[in-house]
């Protein structure tokens, strides 16, 4: 990671946490949790694992939804 990128990320996270501090208490807790979750996904590398899994999950749901529209073949023992 370059020094410029590290400085930018540090400044951006400082601004985000500073902006969260001005929210009412209930909303600040929710925003801190959401920002922390996204920070962890992005910088810990989990997004590289979870994004393909979420895509696979959506693909399986679409396949199942399409399977309901296919006609059932006649014949065979029920």
Image (tube, rainbow, N blue to C red):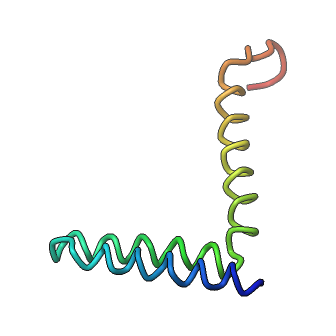
Whether residue 77 sits left or right of residue 12 in the image: it is right
User: At 38% across and 76% down in the image, what residue appears?
Assistant: 33
Find residue 67 and report its horizontal and vertical position in percent. Answer: 72, 27
Q: As drawn, is 1 to the left or to the right of 29?
A: right
Q: Residue at x 72, y 43 (%)?
A: 60
Eyeballing the image, is 48 above or below 63? below
The C terminus lies in which quarter of the figure? Answer: top right
- In the depicted view, which residue is nearer to us: 35 or 64? 35
Q: Position of residue 43 (x, y in %)?
A: 65, 79
**Residue 15 place in picture, x, y as percent:** 41, 76
Query: Residue 46 is drawn in which quadrant?
Result: bottom right
Kindly indicate the quadrant of the structure image that contains residue 66: top right
Q: Is residue 52 above or below residue 4?
A: above
Report the quarter where the N terminus lies: bottom right
Residue 42 is situated, as x and y percent measured from the top left of the image, at 63, 73
Nearest the eye: 67 or 75? 67
State the image quarter where residue 59 is shown.
Answer: top right
40 and 73: which is toward the camera: 40
User: Compared with residue 24, is residue 71 higher up or lower down, i.e. above or below?
Assistant: above
Q: Could you tell me how many numbered marks the image carries? A: 0
The residue at 68%/78% (across/down) is 5
Q: Residue at x 77, y 84 (%)?
A: 2
């Amino acid at each position: 990671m370059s020094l410029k990128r590290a400085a930018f990320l540090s400044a951006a996270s400082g601004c985000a946490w500073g902006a969260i501090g001005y929210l009412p208490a209930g909303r600040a807790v929710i925003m801190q949790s959401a920002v922390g979750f996204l920070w962890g996904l992005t910088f810990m590398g989990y997004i590289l694992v979870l994004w393909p899994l979420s895509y696979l999950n959506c693909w399986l749901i679409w396949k199942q939804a399409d399977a309901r529209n296919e006609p059932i073949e006649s014949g065979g023992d029920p």
